[in-house]
Image: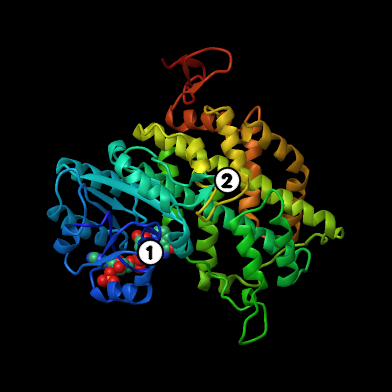
Amino acid sequence: ASAQIGVTGLAVMGSNIARNFAKHGYTVALHNRSIAKTDALLAEHGGDGNFVRTETIEDFVAALEKPRRVLIMVKAGDPTDAVIEELAAAMEPGDIIIDGGNALYTDTIRREAAMKARGLNFVGAGISGGEEGALNGPAIMPGGPKESYESLGPLLESIAAQVDGTPCCTHIGPDGSGHFVKMVHNGIEYADMQLIGEAYHLFRDALGFDAKQIADVFTQWNSGELESYLVEITAEVLNQVDAKTGQPLVDVIVDAAEQKGTGRWTVKSALDLGIPVTGIAEAVFARALSGSRAQRKAAVGLAAGKLGEKPTDVVQFTEDIRQALYASKIVAYAQGFDQIAAGSAEYNWDLRPGDMATIWRGGCIIRARFLNRIKEAYDQNPELPSLILAPYFREAIETAIDSWRRVVATATLLGIPVPAFASSLSYYDALRAERLPAALTQGQRDFFGAHTYERIDAPGKYHTLWSGDRSEVSAD
Ligand code: NDP
């Protein structure tokens, strides 16, 4: 037994992570259901470091130093359960199984409990960064027993992305917390992408910019407070010219967005936790709407009504869009961090939001300069009731607010859909409202269902005898 880590599942992610471990000097045992992938990896990249080729699970497990550490990188869902079962049967108490796939956190909670009962340590680790990140440094969000992190942490931290000397990996919390946090990361990624998409739509249809002009704007934005991986790749995609037609590639791609499910999971979980993640939800719904091709085709030509004038001050409107994007992004992150706090309370995970901001600064898809600000906000006040209330973000929104309103109003008058910009602004306005129409909702609920209400001037619950003399009675 000579390998410090084993990787099973050598498709895109697994093979790149295995190479990453090897490049950091670890001896890596390799395993894949079909041997072809193992051999292809060795043939192409065997020179990256020390690998141990194995064919059966038994050989694979036998190749590992104790306590054994195995990273599973197979398809999420049933295949992961099958591989866990095979491994568990071959491993010994104290060994560590790490699931680095995109598992649903409730599956991870279940699996962790089952492995614990068999004396095994199970670590659900969210990994972000795609293929490139897996090879050169992803962001890693490992959950599971704290003790297992003592042996596992140094390995994961060494292969993770590093920002200012700090690894983008830390122990997140018990059982499913790592995958929960990775899920919310992906939800935020959906919101961020949707907001960028809406900005692009406005440039195209409100200002009449072509793809190249829009790419230039994003390139410029990437040197300011919006600097981020997603803004950077947006410019790259918009700059790409299609070899076949000579058109910008973006203009020949079908406008129907697909999704694998982590955004949907985030919204479902937020609904259960009662947390309004409006930016993420709008992003998931926007993808669904874009993909309803038959319905969209049938709806082309529906009345737009009398549309407003296009903006004439291009420089001002460009800045307005930038501000609207920034403010909406703050809202999306604030909502995501609210969901993390709610998940933490629900499952007793004791999560530290500042940790997420720290490890998301590098390696992952939502990496951004902005996350330094979030980290600072939680450093200053770990109990922050909302990110929006941190002085820095509060001021950023104060600066952006007029632009933000102009963008949403202009888009509405031009018939350009901006669901994430608009819902984020509505969320902000609702959050800061002194009085919401929920009082009426409570009155209605009491009317038809005797659900009771509270009064602003006295404690307790009350009910009006709506079908009687309409006097009020105490409902306590
Ligand atoms: P895939 O999700 O495409 O999975 C392919 C791998 O799973 C192959 O190694 C395959 O083995 C193995 N596999 C499938 N079914 C079984 C089974 N029943 N028993 C044993 N092995 C099985 O690979 P990716 O590399 O794209 O992703 C791996 C994991 O990482 C997934 O959970 C994914 O969600 C997650 N992830 C992916 C990211 C990405 O950018 N792609 C980013 C972050 C996480 P075989 O070769 O024999 O078919």
The mark found on residue 240 in the picture is: none
Query: What quarter of the picture does the C terminus occupy?
Result: top left
Horizontally, is 80 left or right of 86 in the view? Answer: right
**The residue carrying mark 1 has its beta carbon less than 8 Å from ligand 1:** no
Instruction: Examine the image and state in which quarter residue 205 appears.
Output: bottom right
**Residue count near mark 2 (Cα–Cα under 10 Å), binned few <14, some 14–19, many ≥20:** many
Whole-number angstrom distance, CA of label 2 to CA of label 1: 35 Å
Q: Is residue 276 visible?
A: no
The colour scheme applied to this rendered structure is rainbow
Q: Is residue 309 visible?
A: yes
Identify which residue, 308 or 26, lies in the foreground.
26
**The residue carrying mark 2 has its beta carbon less than 8 Å from ligand 1:** no
Identify which residue, 388 or 279, lies in the foreground.
388
Disc 2 marks a residue whose amino acid type is Ala
Residue at figure coordinates x 42%, y 34% from the top left: 351
Q: Position of residue 229 (x, y in %)?
A: 59, 57
**Residue count near mark 1 (Cα–Cα under 10 Å), binned few <14, some 14–19, many ≥20:** many
Horizontally, is 314 left or right of 76 in the view? Answer: right
Disc 1 marks a residue whose amino acid type is Arg
Q: Secondary structure at mark 1?
A: helix
**Disc 2 target residue:** 332
Residue at figure coordinates x 53%, y 41% from the top left: 357
The mark found on residue 19 in the picture is: 1
- Which quadrant of the figure shows ligand 1? bottom left
Q: Position of residue 20 (x, y in %)?
A: 40, 60
Residue at figure coordinates x 71%, y 54% from the top left: 223
Q: Secondary structure at mark 2?
A: helix
